[in-house]
Amino acid sequence: MVPVIALVGRPNVGKSTLFNRLTKSRDALVAEIAGLTRDRKYGEGQIGDEPFIVIDTAGISGEEVGIDAEMASQSFQAIEEADIVLFMVDAQSGIIHADHLLADYLRKKGKEAYVIANKIDGRNPDVVLAEFYELGMGEPIPIAAAHNRGINTLIEHVLSELHGPQEVEPERELTGYEEWEQLYGEKEEAVDVKTQHEELNVKGVKIAVVGRPNVGKSTLINRFLGEERVVVYDQAGTTRDSVYIPYERHGQDYTLIDTAGIRRRKSITEAAEKFSIIKTLQAIQDCHVCVLVLDAKDGIVEQDLHMLSFVLNAGRALVIAINKWDGMTSEDRERVKTELDRRLEFITYADIHFISALHGTNVGNLYKSVDDAYESAMAKWSTSQLTRLLEDMVKNHQPPMVNGRRIKLRYAHQGGSNPPVLVVHGTQTDRLTDAYKRYLANTYRRVLEINGTPIRMVFKSSENPFSEKKEGPTFHAIRQKKIERTQNIRAIKKEKARKSRAKKR
């Protein structure tokens, strides 16, 4: 599962700036859900090829009045969700009572936590860090997030616990957004989340049903499991309590990754669905195929696009289910279809189904698209097959000319699956136009019958062994050098002759 890092601390200690450093851009924000991310913002980071999720929380302070207990509980929930907690303190102002309160809370929870002393620039670390040892949480790590100092050390000491050390490239300074100043009160409303780490016996096609609250995910999952299927067992799979549900349908094994907290009880049919960004993001990373559920009555809203962007970034196969279709008029249906064509024109490879999860209308058709998408995402092709197709494509439509020279594409091979990665080798491949790259990808998709999954094309140029060789002298320079050498020889001979005549006299 994708590991989770929570940034916690009192207001204005630099959590947002560090969030931007770890995600490398404020554009890494995954979702802004009303009532949720007012206090918690979720972003993606990466160490090498391994992803992680960062949570930026609201400030927790015990020195002010007017505490909003619900907002505070959101920050405590982030601590519950995290694998590692980065406890940020202010090196300028030193320790205050709120820092002791939060340190006590983290120790009580038994979380793996590190003290990050921010705003260390211009100060003697040995002197400034000394007082933070009294928090009883080990050696503080000094950084200056605003100036990108100490981030490498932070990664080496902390994030190496996840995937190994990785350097952070220097980048422009990012302005941290204004943090909410809330209180650490007596009312701790942290949600009690199970922390079981059990070996999962998952098999077959892993399907993640994702979508915003109240679009019908719960009903669709129940529909998947309730007709002509044998549920083997329910098993908690992560510390975020996502549920992996292996089952069989028509002899094919499937595993549903349930992010909605669905259980076999009466409340399973409640209209309001639990929504956890963490569980959703991890389910997307872990699945083979995502079924994105949209509400036909609402059309496509910003939250849907946030979810879709994460599916695309993860490279997962995709099937789109437009739910609650049976309650639409003919005019509304045409309007929704027009909107889908306009706003989803960039993912033409994904099948779209219009369903009613409540009544089961067209739900069975989803399996055909899921199976096709899975087969395409996990397919294997030989180097000879991909290279022959590449040669045919080049023959039918040659690459463009660059500075009077034709770009050459020599061979292709597969570099990975889920999603399929096709690697093309040649010369000057970095000069290929986007249009030609699309031509190659679309042709591969059509000929290889790749459905329901994105394709990632990688282009590599052959190294020129003479590229670093110094240029030799020009013809003019060589000729000039010969003339100078001849003149020198003549001058030497003339001088010898003069000296010889002088001796004879």
Image (tube, rainbow, N blue to C red):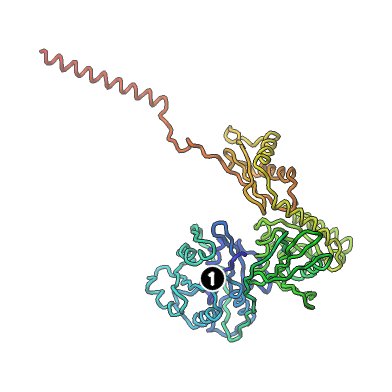
Question: What percent of the width, then of the height, locates residue 244?
Answer: 70, 67
> Could you tell me which residue is drawn at 61 percent across and 37 percent down?
410
> Could you tell me which residue is drawn at 45 percent across and 38 percent down?
468
Identify the residue position indicated by label 1 in the image. 15
314 or 30: nearer the eye? 314
Question: What percent of the width, then of the height, locates residue 245?
Answer: 73, 67
Task: Classify mark 1: helix, strand or loop.
Answer: helix
> Could you tell me which residue is drawn at 81 percent across and 59 percent down?
250
User: Which image quarter holds the C terminus?
Assistant: top left
Q: Is residue 324 visible?
A: no
Question: What percent of the width, then of the height, locates residue 98?
Answer: 51, 81
Number of labelled discs? 1
Q: Is residue 487 left or right of residue 132?
A: left
Q: Measured along the vertical axis of the image, is residue 376 above or below residue 354?
A: above
User: Which image quarter holds the N terminus?
Assistant: bottom right
Density class for disc 1 (Cα within 10 Å; few <14, some 14-19, many ≥20) is many
129 or 281: nearer the eye? 281
Q: Is residue 369 left or right of residue 177?
A: right
> Could you tell me which residue is drawn at 69 percent across and 57 percent down?
316
What kind of residue is marked 1?
Lys
